[in-house]
Amino acid sequence: MIKLAKLNNRPEIFHSIQGEGKNLGKPSVFIRLSLCNLYCKWCDTDYTWNWQGTPYPHNNDAIPGYQKFEKDEMMAVLGDEEIAGIVDDYNCKNLVITGGEPLVQQKSLISLLRLLRDNERGYHIEYETNGTFIPLPEVDALSHQYNVSIKLSNSGVSYEDRIEPEAIAWFAASPKSNFKFVVDTEQDMEEVQAIINKYNISNDVVYLMPQGSSVESLRQKQNWIVEVCKQYNYNYSDRMHIHIWGAKRGI
Ligand SMILES: Nc1nc2[nH]cc(C(=O)O)c2c(=O)[nH]1
Ligand code: SF4
Ligand SMILES: [Mg+2]
């Protein structure tokens, strides 16, 4: 059984275009899992982890009436066949498994991945991951692409929690990985470059993406980020779904 985020009383599985990173613009079905091991203060899917009774501060705390989430209300628990059935109803072969942090539940994902990779189905499987868990061999064997977003200090997460050297080294050595850094200010580049250098990550698999959940906040940062991308041959990633639909869920 797998824990998914719940949207309008249904599991959050939706058909959209990949709005970020290497496959930006590609029609994709998103499977949003619940639970995360981190607690980024600007996380736009805080309903997957910011449970009542936990101490983590979040930018949304400033919104009048914002309350942490009731775990049971925000989670849908589904079996593999149910999930595969929903995914099959879309005419789309690219699957993005996201969250939360999808690899929190990686052991439970193995049987679902086997179903999805069945010859008849033949899905292409990519993950949005925070890079703190090494994929199990069974998971890796059934997966095509890791969009690894190692968190920087701008997330508010402690260094010990967000940086797992063995996991980063594993992803850096995998040809399936690309690295998407969420950047706020030019000061963030020191941390990005320290990670890239330490783990020998090639610039052409690096994506810099502005932090923000509104068109204005993305636009504010795009100019300096593009200049840094030109200077170092990193890739620029926008958040295309925000430009198209705004800060909504299930898009
Ligand atoms: N369209 C669209 N693209 C995305 N790329 C990564 C997403 C995520 O939330 O992980 C996401 C998302 O939520 N929507
Ligand atoms: S790692 Fe991702 S899902 Fe987890 S808190 Fe940070 S932004 Fe949110
Ligand atoms: Mg998102």
Image (cartoon, rainbow, N blue to C red):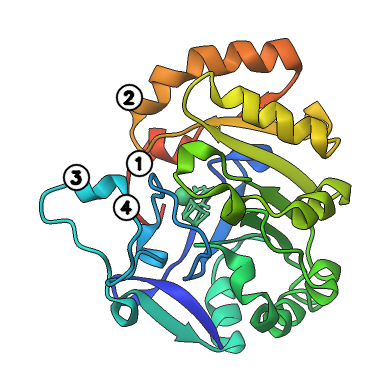
Rate crowding at label 2 as few (under 14), some (14 to 19) or many (20 or more) other CA atoms within 10 Å: few
Q: Earlier in the sequence, mark 1 or mark 2?
A: 2
Residue 81 location in percent, x, y?
60, 88
Residue 49: x %, y % from top left: 41, 66
Cα gap from disc 4 to disc 2, whole angstroms: 23 Å
Name which residue lies at 33% across and 40% down.
Answer: 246
Circle 4 sits on which residue? 57
The nearer-to-camera label among 2 and 3 is: 3
Q: CA distance from mark 3 to mark 4?
A: 10 Å
> Between marks 4 and 1, how big is the CA–CA gap?
27 Å
Amino acid on which the number 2 mark rests in the picture: Glu
> N-terminal of the two: label 4 or label 2?
4
**Which quarter of the picture shows residue 187?**
top right
Residue in front for this viewpoint, 83 or 128: 128
Assess mark 1: CB under 8 A from ligand 1? Answer: no
Give the number of the mark in front: 3 or 4. 4
- Identify the amino acid type marked 1: Trp
Which label's residue is closer to the chain start, 2 or 3? Answer: 3
Query: Is the Cβ of the residue at disc 4 closer than 8 Å to that at disc 1?
Result: no
> Which structural element holds mark 4?
loop
Of callouts 3 and 4, which one flags the residue occurring earlier in the amino acid sequence? Answer: 4
Instruction: Check disc 3 and report its element: helix, strand or loop.
Output: helix
Query: Contact, CB < 8 Å: mark 4 with mark 2?
Result: no
Badge 1: how crowded within 10 Å, few (<14), some, or many (20+)? few
Q: Is residue 194 left or right of residue 183?
A: right
Question: Which label sits on residue 216?
Answer: 2
Residue in view at x 52 percent, y 76 percent: 86
- Between residue 154 and residue 184, name the one nearer to us: 154
- Residue 245 is marked as 1
SS state under label 1: helix
